[in-house]
Amino acid sequence: MSFSRFWFTAGFVGSVLMPGLAFAQGMMEDTTERKQPLEIWGIQFEEFEYRYSDDDEELGVWNGDFFYGTDALKVRWLTKGEYAIEEQAYEGLENQLVGQIPISTFFDAKAGVRFDTPEGPDRTYAVLGVSGLAPQWFEVDANLYVSDEGDTSAEVDAEYELLLTNYWILAATVDATVAFSEDREIGIGKGLVSTETGLRLSYDLIDRSVSPYVGVVHERKYGDSADFAESAGGSTEDWFAVIGARIAF
Amino acid sequence: MRKRLLTGLFSLFVPALVFAGEYNLTVDRVTIDTGDFIKEGIGYNGKSPGPVLRFKEGENVKINVTNNLDEMTSIHWHGLILPFQQDGVPGISFPGIKAGETFTYEFSVVQAGTYWFHSHSGFQEPDGAFGSIIIEPKGREPFRYDREYVIQLTDKHPHTGDRIMRNLKMMPDYYNREQQTVGEFFSDAKTNGLMNTLKDRMAWGDMRMMKADVEDVQGFTGMINGKGPEQNWTGLFEPGERIRLRFINSSAMTYFDVRIPGLNMTVVQADGNNVQPVNVDEFRIGVAETYDVIVRPRDAQAYTIFAESMGRSGYARATLAPKEGMEAAVPTMRKPARLTMADMGGMHGMDHGDMDHGSMNHGAMDEMDHSGMSGMDHGSMAAMDHSTHGSMGADKEKPDDPFYAKGSGIMPEAANGGKFLSYADLKAQKPLYEEREPTREIELRLTGNMERYTWSINGVKYADADPIRLQYGERVRFKFVNETMMTHPMHLHGMWSILDVGAGQWNPVKHTVSVQPGTTVFMETEVDAPGQWAFHCHLSYHAAAGMFRKVVVEGAPQASQVSAELVTNEGGGA
């Protein structure tokens, strides 16, 4: 058969209908999905929880993000909120839309906008940040904000996960905000503004999609920010018991 | 049409020179039951795995593939030497097979041995689209057997391929449930001392690398011929018979360590090519590789075929028995493997100083001679530490497998302390090519970033890469340098990979070559197949993440190009 094919070919090589086309078709360009950058999306909520404070305040809290993109560029929508259940009001409501590009093996740079629309005055900020994995497995996220009022502030987030087992995970988080100028209208004083420290014990119930947890969270305001809170009749330090779930899809 | 008719007429005049067989395959949505879970998947002729295709060497085969899916598909004939348009890689060999269409593959079978076929579209292969190929040789085989079975391994996962890829990109350790825990820290501290253990953890933490990063995708059920461990696929035999077992690893991601307690195995073929027989107690089969072994059970008892994954996160099990329903004991899996600093040897910019102590654990290390050790782990301990393994005796010391980094944590070791097959043991039965100097060397660094789950060659992903251009008639020496901490089974389509094991003209001829972390492996290729071909890591999610290249073979003599063209014309019309 291969013999016959060869002689047949030799004889008809001149009269084959569209040899050029056939060969072009043979040596095709790869335009399949494989040759395109891999597009990925995901939804993650590091926090999705109910908080009960030491002075009987009840909060619904979330901190999550949705992303879509490639290795080279991702678009990320981050959303964060604190809803006071009794007052039926958002103590905090923050949405960010950022573009994210890799800048080193383990770190990405982010730039975008942040909209704060809680109960009370709103703010819009420009955001510039880095996030990634620091040595010894610390997840780090650091952002610089410039508000539409011209005020500058910075926020640093760090998380460490301790594997008690491959399913029971103890996660420690620290979040600190520093303001470089005062924005009294929203209760921000110059200097260290606030910290939030958390410890959550989770169990991976369904893969890593749903991981219920319990934990404690400590919130504290400092300096002028603490004074502003006090004069507004708010607290400067709170302890919360939390129950919730880490979610990833 | 005219051509077809003429070819048909012509073949009337040269009758009976060759066999010609016609085969039909349908690509179907199927249900896969592993015994642990039931899932939707893709199969052939209504089943996953698909049928065993039996060809004869020299036969001209015609295979009609009907796509009953609602998406594109393709079939790649893994390891078969054929015109590139018949190779079945969408975007490289042909456009693919559209939903509802039938595509006819036509090629001559120019080889013999055990091979397999699978979809090369998306994640259809991990979803179940594969089957096996047995090609009977023209002449006599250099070994005898009374009975044969295909043993097709896979790592069936409850998640679809798309989902797995997305999860890995989102969280690279999504499926890794063998990570080091607080408990392991304390047990290591007890064995190796607190400071050593702390130093070890700090050294790995500094690199942001995990010692437990041996298997990316865990949580699978190991299967043999479509049966999970509980469903226990059984092959029957009469005591005293020689049984040829054709092992094929069709896994998406999993290397298996295979043994049959109570039976010695004689390896007679690797990747379809006969090798000089080697007696072993156990062998490691890389993803996409095949090994043919002969066993001879003399007693009327059952034997367990036990295939535990390299990272010990799962296993496949089957039985050889004189009667249906008999079973033998199923071994328990060994401890999960831990990488060592030796496996990191290929990584750039790593500080190797002062790591020796830190990376040693899992054994009574105190008495050991530390000279020349760059990081011993439990995998290689038995051979090293005679004081605590008195039963083994000094003369039983096994040499390290040269295809692993010295002191590698994934260095294989036979469960019974016996012989574990190494690439170094593979010698061709008969050289396929004349020995000659390679005309040039091409270095391919296997690269990646585990935290981002990007995989690449020479730091460039397929999406951004130019093809590798080879000249017809040259003999290229490929130098693989594994700079990642994972094993990569590299598969070149269309042309043989002559693995350099230092045996000169007896170097074995393979289609898939595993490159272990921290090692450099050479293979040579006689560039004798015009056209364009795929060349990639056969771990499904590594290939999809970018560890993939197109190879273009240029400058072929006119005749072979035109005949290749013609096959397209004939085959592509269906």
Image (spheres, helix red, strand yellow):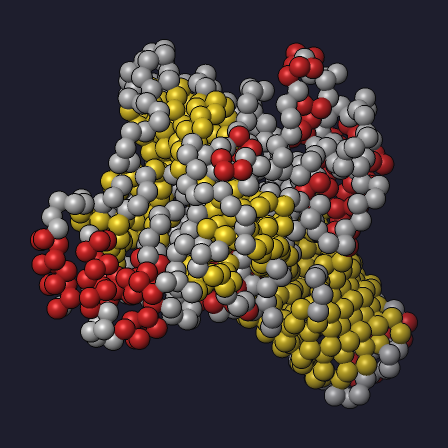
Image height of B296 relative to A220, above or below? above
Q: Is residue A139 left or right of residue B560?
A: right
Count of numbered circles in the view: 0
Q: Position of residue B354 (x, y in %)?
A: 84, 41
Image height of B437 relative to B134, above or below? below
Q: Is residue B432 left or right of residue A161?
A: left
Q: Position of residue B38 (x, y in %)?
A: 36, 44
Q: Which quadrant of the figure has residue B296?
A: top left
Image height of B210 relative to B7, above or below? above
Residue situated in front as seen by the camera: B130 or A165? B130
Q: Residue furthest bottom?
A: A149
Is residue B43 at least partly visible in the picture?
A: yes
Q: Position of residue A225 (x, y in %)?
A: 85, 74
Say which residue appears at 42% left-offset and 32% top-offset.
Answer: B429
Residue situated in front as seen by the camera: A65 or B571? B571
Quadrant of the rendering where the C terminus of chain B is positioned: bottom left
Residue situated in front as seen by the camera: B87 or A55? B87
Say which residue appears at 64% left-offset and 76% top-offset.
Answer: A98
Is residue B218 at least partly visible in the picture?
A: no
Say which residue appears at 69% left-offset and 77% top-offset.
Answer: A111
Q: Is residue B396 left or right of residue B110?
A: right
Quadrant of the rendering where the N terminus of chain B is positioned: bottom left
Residue situated in front as seen by the camera: A193 or B458? B458
Q: Position of residue B76 (x, y in %)?
A: 35, 53
Say which residue appears at 64% left-offset and 16% top-offset.
Answer: B396
